[in-house]
Amino acid sequence: MQESTGQYITVDEMARLLEQDAAVTLIDARTAEEFARGHVPGAMNVAIADLVDFARSRGYPLNELVVTMCGSGGRGEKAAGILTAEHVGNVRALQGGLAAWSNAGFPVVGSDRQGS
């Protein structure tokens, strides 16, 4: 299994943390329409444009791990950068996004199992 480095977390690592009921905040940075088509169970939808307000309203730094994601990784990486710039601690982007999660056989809520 490939371990995460720097600002990333692998799907296997994230699944292991979720199985252990670890304190993890999952943020899906896609649009509401994309999120509705399919997302990781337990993820909240916070679009890129709303991330700064979200971080400030939650207070920072957050103590728990924050995992950002999107359909394939690009917006998840951007979201991780935004939250890090807002001094949110322990932020990681999900490598490969929802597509990697789904392709690895992990559960997806919604009808679009491929992500977007």
Image (spheres, grey):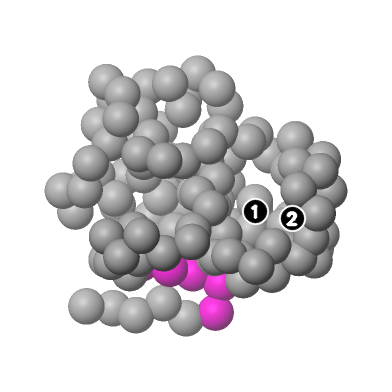
**Which quarter of the figure has residue 94?**
bottom left
State the quadrant of the N terminus. Answer: bottom left
State the quadrant of the C terminus. Answer: top left
Mark-to-mark CA distance, 1 and 2: 6 Å
Characterize the local packing of mark 2: few (<14), some (14-19) or many (20 or more) Cα atoms within 10 angstroms: some
Characterize the local packing of mark 1: few (<14), some (14-19) or many (20 or more) Cα atoms within 10 angstroms: some
The residue labelled by disc 2 is: 82
Q: Is residue 91 above or below residue 98?
A: below
Q: In this view, does 66 lie above or below 39?
A: below
Which residue type does callout 2 highlight?
Ile
Are the residues flagged by discs 1 and 2 in contact, CB closer than 8 Å? yes
Q: Residue at 83% across / 48% down in the picture?
A: 56
* Region in magenta: 6-11
Q: Is residue 62 above or below residue 106?
A: below
Residue 28, horizontal then vertical, whole percent: 52, 41
Residue 78, numbered label? 1
From the viewer's perspective, tell me whether residue 8 is left or right of residue 98: right
Along the line of sight, the residue nearer the viewer: 1 or 13: 13
Residue 42, numbered label? none
- Residue 84 visible at all: no
Residue 36, horizontal then vertical, whole percent: 43, 21
Q: Residue at 58% across / 40% down in the picture?
A: 29
* Element type at mark 2: helix
**Which quarter of the figure has residue 91?**
bottom right
